[in-house]
Image: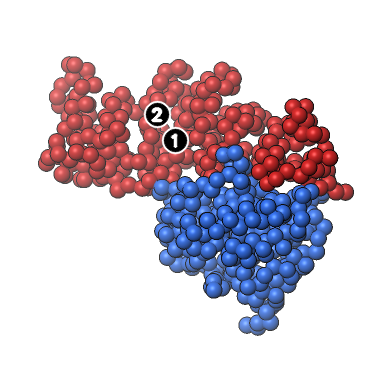
Chain colours: A blue, B red
């Protein structure tokens, strides 16, 4: 059973000074694991200072769980070392692949939803969880294409991965919305199919409308449609840790904090809780 | 129609297409020309729809790949980017990524080979000392999050070190790099660093292009700094960087690089001045002996 951490934000360096300067109104922080898999300097110092006052979650982008390259043992060792140092509430990454042939794309690339890919991801995930000595959560990534060879919808693939590998799900509601628009499916159908008991965390973020498609840019406020989906997900899943991500055109702290408080209010409203 | 590949095949083809320098459609055409694809039509791989073709959907990933890495390099090499301007920098990144696709899980490592790549690039002839400018910027990136240390104060240096000058060893802190750069680089970097934080290079008067200058880059607390060095300081710090040295050994090295007619008092004054400087810059730690 993972704890409900409340409402948090992604900690970015633009806000280091503000967060260190005194109390905030957010409950917890999430950081990009790779940014802190370093030897020393200010990032690690800040992380340890923040950890004294808040729960932290390590959220990675380079696990490459779906890659057909061998698992990167150096990466896993570094992640395990960081987790031992920080004692995060949990560790997460994405349901995607990022490297092939020894080359890193540094992007969350999509998987074909096939039985072959499913077995591959489950097998690697089991090895990763054993190496790290902990279960992890996988996030649904935004996608911009559908593979012609896919044989099942994304929500079925995600649910099967979580079930077979016994891992958690980091449900990114904005990503569900972005992919739903890009591929023309019903986002509520997706959310209704996700195994609620496996959802450890929900992500919220803004995206950019490029005309022909939506792009998951994390560069703006959460849009109304995503807030509505968040309420839908909250009613179905209950109170789980929720987080606002903002990675481009990062606003001042007050704006980000206000967005997190809005998420808290939206979840309370959805769950019928009145202050 | 070509069959949908297995997972390995999907990923290898995907990579080739999104890293094709002239875009996915041309990349597919080239693969077809080389008989690696049965057709330029990518619908066997990616489903097209009313909004976008298969190649256009893959192009979304191709653009994200390139621009994410370009932005990362722009952040790590701001002076280089300013020196070249947007178009040349963009083209340099294109060349660089083709020659040095990322092989590390962290974007932090992406620019490590760029200074060496630049040294052999045509731009180096057009913009002399460009590779040295990149070396300076990479050293600054590299020390930013290098291992922490407990730097020695002047008291720390002179206390036990002076009472037993041959027994106590010192070493350069891990977050320090010693470079030899074209004399034009420090003033150029300072001019290009429009955002302030120009480092402690106020003593860098510059010099004629082609003349090498010793430079040290280091982290003091959380601040990344750099400054030029006289040859005698460079000689001492090289010894301290390669395994450490005792105070007596450093003094001996210093005496060895002074003019043969230099008075002992002059050498002692210089030694004291360097110890003061190193303590103020927090660049030494205990080590060796």
Of all chains, the one bearing label 1 is B
Residue A255 at what x, y percent from top left? 62, 62
Residue in the image at 57% along x and 22% along y? B121
Identify the image quadrant of the C terminus of chain A.
Answer: bottom right
Mark 2 residue crowding within 10 angstroms, few (<14) / some (14–19) / many (20+) = some
Residue A109 left/right relative to B262: right
Residue under label 2, please give it: B179
Nearer to me, B1 or B110 = B1
Q: Are the residues at dot 2 and dot 1 in contact (C-beta closer than 8 Å)?
A: yes
How crowded is the residue under tag 1: few (<14 C-alpha within 10 Å), some, or many (20+)?
Answer: many
Q: Is residue B203 visible from the viewing direction of this image?
A: no
Total of numbered circles in the picture?
Answer: 2
Which quadrant: the N terminus of chain A? Answer: bottom right
Q: Quadrant of residue A161?
A: bottom right
Badge 2 marks a residue whose secondary structure is strand
The residue closer to the viewer here, A231 or A148, is A148
Q: Residue at x 70, y 55 (%)?
A: A115
Question: Is residue B214 shown left or right of residue B77?
Answer: left
Give me the chain letter of mark 2: B
Q: Residue at x 62, y 51 (%)?
A: A66
Q: Are marks 2 and 1 on the same chain?
A: yes
Residue where numbered disc 1 is placed? B139
């Amino acid at each position: 059973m993972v704890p409900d951490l409340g409402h948090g934000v992604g900690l970015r360096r633009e806000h280091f000074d503000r967060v260190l300067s005194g109390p905030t109104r957010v409950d917890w922080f999430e950081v990009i694991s790779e940014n802190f898999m370093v030897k020393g300097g200010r990032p690690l110092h800040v992380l340890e200072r923040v950890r004294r006052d808040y729960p932290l979650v390590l959220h990675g982008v380079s696990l490459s769980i779906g890659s057909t390259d061998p698992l990167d043992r150096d990466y896993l060792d570094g992640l395990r070392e960081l987790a031992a140092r920080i004692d995060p509430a949990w560790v997460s990454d994405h349901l995607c692949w990022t490297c092939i042939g020894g080359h890193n794309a540094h992007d969350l690339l999509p998987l074909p939803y096939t039985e072959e890919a499913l077995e591959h991801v489950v097998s690697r995930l089991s090895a990763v969880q054993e190496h790290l000595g902990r279960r992890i959560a996988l996030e649904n990534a935004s996608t911009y294409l559908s593979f012609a060879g896919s044989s099942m919808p994304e929500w079925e693939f995600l649910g099967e991965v979580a079930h077979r590998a016994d891992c958690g799900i980091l449900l990114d509601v904005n990503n569900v919305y972005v992919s739903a628009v890009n591929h023309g499916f019903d986002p509520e159908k997706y959310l209704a199919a996700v195994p609620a008991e496996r959802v450890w965390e929900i992500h919220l973020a803004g995206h950019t409308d490029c005309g022909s498609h939506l792009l998951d840019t994390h560069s703006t406020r959460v849009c109304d449609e995503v807030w509505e989906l968040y309420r839908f997900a909250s009613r179905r899943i209950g109170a789980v840790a929720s987080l606002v991500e903002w990675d481009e055109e990062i606003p001042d702290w007050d704006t980000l904090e206000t967005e997190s408080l809005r998420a808290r209010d939206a979840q309370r409203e959805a769950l019928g809780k009145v202050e | 129609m070509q069959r949908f590949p297995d997972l390995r095949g999907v990923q290898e083809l995907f990579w080739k297409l999104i890293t094709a320098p002239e875009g996915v459609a041309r990349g597919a055409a080239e693969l077809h020309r080389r008989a690696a694809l049965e057709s330029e039509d990518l619908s066997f791989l990616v489903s097209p729809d009313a909004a976008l073709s298969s190649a256009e959907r893959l192009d979304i990933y191709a653009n994200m790949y390139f621009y994410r890495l370009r932005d990362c390099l722009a952040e790590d090499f701001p002076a280089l980017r300013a020196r070249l301007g947007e178009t040349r920098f963009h083209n340099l990144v294109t060349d660089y990524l083709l020659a040095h696709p990322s092989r590390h899980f962290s974007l932090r490592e992406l620019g490590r080979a760029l200074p060496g790549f630049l040294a052999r690039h045509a731009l180096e002839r057009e913009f002399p000392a460009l590779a040295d400018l990149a070396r300076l910027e990479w050293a600054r990136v590299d020390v930013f999050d290098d291992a922490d240390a407990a730097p020695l104060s002047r008291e720390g240096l002179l206390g036990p070190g002076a009472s037993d000058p041959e027994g106590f060893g010192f070493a350069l802190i891990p977050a320090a790099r010693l470079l030899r750069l074209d004399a034009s680089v420090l003033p150029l970097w300072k001019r290009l660093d429009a955002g302030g934080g120009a480092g402690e290079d106020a003593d860098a008067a510059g010099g004629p292009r082609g003349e090498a200058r010793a430079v040290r880059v280091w982290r003091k607390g959380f601040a990344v700094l750099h400054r030029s060095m006289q040859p005698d300081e460079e000689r001492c710090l090289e010894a301290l960087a390669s395994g450490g040295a005792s105070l007596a050994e450093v003094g001996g090295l210093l005496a060895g690089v002074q003019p043969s007619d230099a008075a002992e008092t002059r050498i002692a004054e210089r030694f004291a001045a360097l110890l003061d400087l190193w303590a103020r810059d927090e660049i030494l730690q205990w080590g060796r002996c």
